[in-house]
Amino acid sequence: MPEGNKVLARNIRQARRNMGITQQQAAELLGITQLHYGRLERGDRRTSLEQIEDIARVFQVSPYTLLDGCFRE
């Protein structure tokens, strides 16, 4: 898994935990399955910018927060 995916997955997981919700609750808020959401948090699934914006909106953070550290050399 590319390093950027790991960082994005970690940032998504942290944002969800900061909200105090489960993966199932996050999946429901995003309109996706828990299986799909779990793959996003593990970095097993590529994420579109549109989906990053949706996740950021649901978790009440900036998309930049989720992307922080993904593009370091």
Image: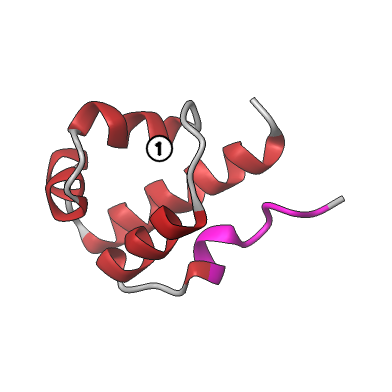
In the image, which residues are magenta? 64-72
How many labels, in total? 1
Q: Position of residue 16 (x, y in %)?
A: 30, 54
Q: Name which residue type carries label 1.
A: Glu
Q: Does the magenta stretch include residue 68?
A: yes
Q: Position of residue 19 (x, y in %)?
A: 24, 62
Direction from residue 62 to residue 31 in the image, left or right: left
User: What residue is disc 1 on?
Assistant: 41
Q: Which residue is drawn at 64% across and 25% down?
A: 1
Work out whether 52 lies above or below 41.
below
Classed neighbour count for the residue bearing mark 1: other residues with Cα under 10 Å, few (<14), some (14–19), many (≥20):
many
Q: Does the magenta stretch include residue 65?
A: yes
**Res 35 → quadrant:** top left
Q: Depth check: 37 or 23 in front? A: 37
Q: Depth check: 50 or 39 in front? A: 50
Q: Where is residue 68 in the image (x, y as percent from the top left)?
A: 62, 62
Q: Is mark 1 on a helix, strand or loop?
A: helix
Direction from residue 47 to residue 72 in the image, left or right: right
